[in-house]
Amino acid sequence: MKQLKLVLIGLLILSCNSEKKEKISEIPDTFTKLTSLVDAFAENIIKKGNSNSFAVAIYKDGEMYQNYYGEIDKGGNNKPNDSSLYEIASITKTFTGSLVAKAVLAGKISLDDDIRKYLEGDYSNLEFEGQPITVKHLLTHSMGLKNKLTKGFEAIRNKVTSGTYDFKTDSYTMDDLLLELKEVEVNKKPGTMYTYNSLGPELLAYILEKVNKQPFKRQMNTLFKELGMNDTYLDESIKYKNRLINGYKGDTLAPIDHNPVYGAAGGAISTLPDLSQYMKFLVDNKAEPWVKEASRLLFEDKEEDEQVGYLWQNMGFAEKEGYYYSKTGTSNRVQSGVLICPDSDYGIIVMVNNTSDEALNDWVKLFFRDIEPMLITYPKLNLASIFRIDFNENPTKAYQNFRTHKKDTLIYDFDLRDLNNFGYDLLNDKQNHKAIEVFKFLTEEFPENANIYDSLGESYFITKDYKNALISFKKALELNPDMKTSRNYIKKIEELKLPK
């Protein structure tokens, strides 16, 4: 997926045949070995010091694993637990979308309904060149509005973000939104451009109240119970304040989040066990009509590289894992994300209670660089992941284990790109000489791979070892004459006019 939209995904699917899969499942403790790797990666990221704590859940082929890492408050000796409530922010939208999917299947709502069908009064402004805003446009962030929020909604959100919102005196209701909605400008044709906003989900909640004839909050609570989520609440942050996990922006304690109107866009709080139950339900019940409908792709904005369904995002098909859909949530305190891969029977949840840029970057890495590749290859163990853990402990051990296991394709699998990316991770962390060690090892193991020689050349170039850089780049070109990066680096070295 892309970074922080979340979308650093190079999502891939398992490709082993059923006979091999059956044999692999007989290998004892395979899932335990997988979870030990998850633990190792999470603990290593916590040691970097950017993130306070992580909550992680993985679900694969009917097996669930949940764990917590770090401390809620640094130095507080208070690891999160199953009672810790997290602000799941925009993940709330997926529940709103699910209720709409149910209403669509029941014939109560049509995706092509003009939303003015459900509004009383004159809203002639809610169209552009004859194209009205429809329910589908609310679901897919493609309303075509000039501004993402109305003035009052934006003012309340600014108060929440700055920590000046007063839960007792500040208010912004559906009546306020409906009044301001008469003044919004639609300056783009609805259904043509993705623009993320929180107005759509709140309007959907209003429509759901109309068609289902009961309060939106009651509808959400009923859905939570249906999903087995008995410790998840909508718009109850103050009531459960003592259980709400502290969250930080760097070293600064962040204010409690609040979502105006119904909270349909981001007002839910939940525990890791409850979110895990949600993930499990979606994977296990992928053939359920409302789950299939709620996870269906409805709109794609190719220019923005966004794929959206019933408020789920970053959806599509990948080479190995098949269909996937996901949603992230960012509150003042917590960054969270859930990824569902129904074709490959797995899901991932990762939450961190720090929203600094550094912590968000660590969250992305743990989610997509560290954990997901292991779920993609499972039930085979991901040898690239094992190599990374071993290398951090003992490079010699890493080399030996890799050489021993790489031919055992029944138990182990790996993608050479993951190993190559590990070298670049070391470069990004300024561990240049360790990166050179990794790339040199990889050239020995895969001497016909031009890209690895190109990577080795780049690591030498960064350390100003231009002689060895030149040797590596020329070897890369020998193996692949079309390797443009090697050619460009050779040109750079020649322009340095180094003494011979």
Image (cartoon, rainbow, N blue to C red):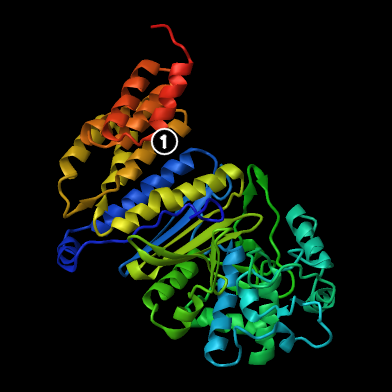
User: Which x, y percent locates residue 199?
Assistant: 71, 71
Question: What percent of the width, then of the height, locates residue 164?
Answer: 80, 56
Residue in the foreground of this view, choosing between 482 and 320: 482
From the viewer's perspective, is 393 left or right of 494? left
The one nearer the camera, 442 or 491, is: 491
Q: Residue at x 76, y 70 (%)?
A: 186
Asked which quadrant contains residue 258, the reply is: bottom right
Q: How many marks?
A: 1
Q: Is residue 345 left or right of residue 444?
A: right
Residue on which the image places disc 1: 424
Horizontal arrangement in the rendering, residue 363 relative to residue 393 (left or right) = right
Instruction: List x then y, in percent, for residue 334.
Output: 59, 56
| Rendered residue at 59%/49% (across/down) | 354
Residue 289, compared with residue 442, is above or below; it is below
What is the quadrant of the C terminus in the image?
A: top left
| Secondary structure state at the residue bearing disc 1 | helix
- Residue 52 in view of the camera: no
Residue 181 versus residue 190: which sits nearer the camera? 190
Q: Does residue 447 appear in the picture of this structure?
A: yes
- Residue 456 point in image, percent of width and height: 35, 29
